[in-house]
Image: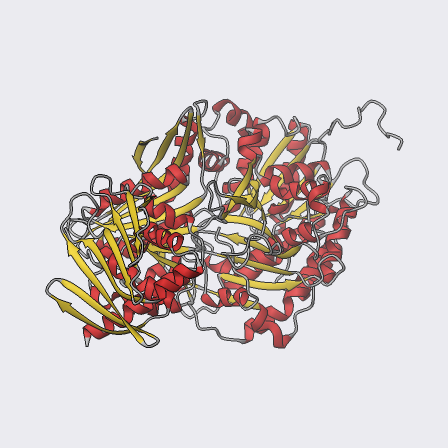
Amino acid sequence: METIVIQKQESHPSTIELELRHILDAMQGTNTMRACLLNLIIYTKDSPRRSYFEKVAQKIIEKFPSRIIFLSEYEKKDGLHTYVSVLTAKSGDNLIFCDLITIEFGESFAKRVPFIILPYILPDLPLYILWGEDPIYKNPNWLQLEKFIYKLIFDSEVIKQLPRFATSMANYLQICSYKIADLNWARIEEWRKLLAVSFHTADKIEGLQQTKCMKITYNCTESALFSHTKIQALYLQSWLASRMHWDFQSIVMNKKNLIISYSNQNSSIEVILQPTMLTTIQPGGIFSLEIDTVNNLHFLFKRSAKNPLHISIDFSNPNFCEIPTYYLFSSEESGQSLVQEIFHRGPNIHFFQALQIVKQIQDLVCK
Amino acid sequence: MIHTYPLEEIGQINRQLDPCIIIIFGATGDLTARKLIPALYNLKRDNQLPPNFACIGFARREQSEEQFRKEQREAVGKYSRMQPLDESVWKEFEKHLFYHSSEFQKEEGYRSLKERLAQIDQEHGTKGNRIYYLSTQPEYFAVIIQQLKKQNLLYDVTTVKTKWSRVIIEKPFGHDLASAKNLQQQLLSHLSEEQIYRIDHYLGKETVQNILVFRFANSIFESLWNHRYIDHIQITVAESIGIESRGNFFEKEGLLRDIIQNHMMQLLTLIAMEPPANLHADAVRDEKVKVLQSIRPVINQDLDRIAIRGQYASGYTFGEKVVGYREEADVAKDSNIETYVALKLFIDNWRWAGVPFYLRGGKRLPKRATEIAIVFQRPPGILFSVQEKENNPNILVIRVQPNEGIALTINSKAPGPASPIQPVKMDFCYGAFFGLTPPEAYERLICECIFGDTTLFAREDEVFNSWAIFDPLLQHWAEKKEIFPNYTAGSWGPKEADQLIEADGRKWRLL
């Protein structure tokens, strides 16, 4: 699959549709087809994340042909420029192209932007917003768009006030009318699936309920795009805690490890988030998860050092040791998790409940 | 059925347009430059005008014929749907274009007009046939008709059979029910109803005419066209422009009179009417009137619940800063006039029992778009509603303008094992399919008037019934001061309009 951007040209905001039509007319007679399943607005500020989101956009249209409205806000530049072009995804003999509207603007023009976008959202198709900035930040003019949003996808990697983000997000989720998803939540989707598959029987769930200690190791290597590396690990343990109805008790830092305590009926559970430096997986990615239960069951889910998409699953108890089995994660290329998030159309109850646990943890940390 | 014209093959439209002169009153106005002269030019270009044809512009401004022709040439160059202007067509057309200057009230002006018409009849062979196009402020309608009658320029249809005279009247036809009846009375003292052509240019649009074809020539839709399958209907007339130079007009009329009472009610009646017995003017108009008569009367205590009005504040249109309504030229700083209206109406008949019709129209909305959306009832969510509470409803959208066409939204399975349901659209675009720029509404309507077919014009009882629906609302609004402005230019209207529909568990469609 190959994706290309063609015929990028500057356009006045009032003639965007006309210019797109001209591009479409110019492509008549070629082996191309215009397609659109949804509207996707991508917003980011001038940062290294811009090229990351461009890749994300390309990844999306390969799966979901969309009208993409790409908004780049520049803190240092002024003015407002609008461009139209088409993104083309080539697959075999078929060439599918999608509208791409790019709006680059300085801070002082930000309030105009929602009014430029509004006429160009395609009716009757869902509107997704990939918000590459802090979702708590509010431009009042964005309210014009809010009522049309189907799902807002943000990336908690860019949260400015990390200790408070879960509180803010949980509150936000309660008042907003649309669905909200976090890319870091999407990034642990494979782990959630793996655990759901591994603990799908009553006896396995019973075993998990008896957890005494759980250790999650994650890649703490930071990069320009990823600096809040413990979020995925935090989400994963919160998800498990919320699904198993564990009650959060306390949190302590022990050297570099974060130790979170829960109570479960009469027993206590200790969760250790252990950072480790790795180059084979993405920053923040989870490397392994190990569970010990009160009745001495031991579960270990661990990525292969050679191929991090291969997960070995070890299960043992004092009497026997199962032959390891393997689980295969799908590709972690940029954008893949977002595409999955778009596929996911459920009500996000798991995310909301996990967020409540993270909120409790953060509330205690902030005290 | 016996075919009445033995030389005409069944199914072949063979219409002979009579020679005639069109006299446009208010010829220096916006409508003439933007619509009427470009329409006549395009008809000439498409060879749709009778060969013996002339047009006289009648207005107060003193100017030469050359000056008038020059101005109109520029207008055609700017506003005609066919670009660029074809010099050879224009040169031929302008030979038939004249100008006559006079005050509307002055008898002398009509006396000289009569002489001029007689002279043109002789030179151009127009045989005494006349269309008087009243494109003036409504207060001049009666006086113009009176003066024309005085000079015997309006013929008595009962006695004069060799030539005809017709009058096209621009909207608004009256200011309310009483004034509409009063105007009708004044007109009828000089004319007969069959000579009056009340224009509503929406009826000249191809997509509007196609509503009847779509409904009554396709069995799959008509069988679903009732309260058993349709949840509600939304009709939207959105304009991105403000009031432009029409401050004086708008301060008197407001949006309800400008758009809702006429254009939107025409769309509503065409969508809701029963199949007519045939396609003759009266058969179609009878059915439309029945719809208007079935609209549930609005009662005083309901008015604020079923009707919302708005006025735009400054904001942004396509990224450009624009002023608020009260800052526009010729508008009062404390104006109480509406530039936005949202309404909920019910048609109390067998077909539409309980189906709300939501209407909204406004100036300075995000885009120019006129659409009718038929929102079908949601399918039972037994099979596919595990993740989503309910499936999206099917929506049939008739796009009147721009990008004329019809789209149907259906639910589809997205590829992959997860099987999420995704709304997808089947879209028919006139332009893409027929490859033609559809004629402007005014072209069609002028032709129909020359031909003498009133089907696409509003009959008096249509107009009266429509005013009768809105009279209580207009009175209520006249007495009540609103907190204006209440929506930002470039947005989709006031939040109260959202609340109007959301109170019923529905949402305005994003256009």
Compared with residue A29, is residue A54 higher up or lower down, i.e. above or below? below
Against B318, is B470 above or below?
below
**Residue located 76% across and 52% down the image:** B287
Residue at 42% x, 48% y is A343
Instruction: Examine the image and state in which quarter residue B96 appears.
Output: top right
Which of the pair B140/B341 is nearer the observer? Answer: B341
The residue under the point 46% across, 58% down is B247
- Residue A68 percent across, percent down from the top left: 36, 43
> Foreground residue, A74 or B459?
A74
- x, y percent for residue B429: 55, 36
Q: How is the image coloured?
A: secondary structure
Q: Position of residue B274 (x, y in %)?
A: 75, 51
Extreme residue toward the right, this view: B2
Q: Quadrant of residue A51?
A: top left
- For residue B116, say whether it is visible: yes
From the top left corner, tell me how far across and down residue A283 is, in percent: 19, 50
Depth order, front residue of B176/B4: B4
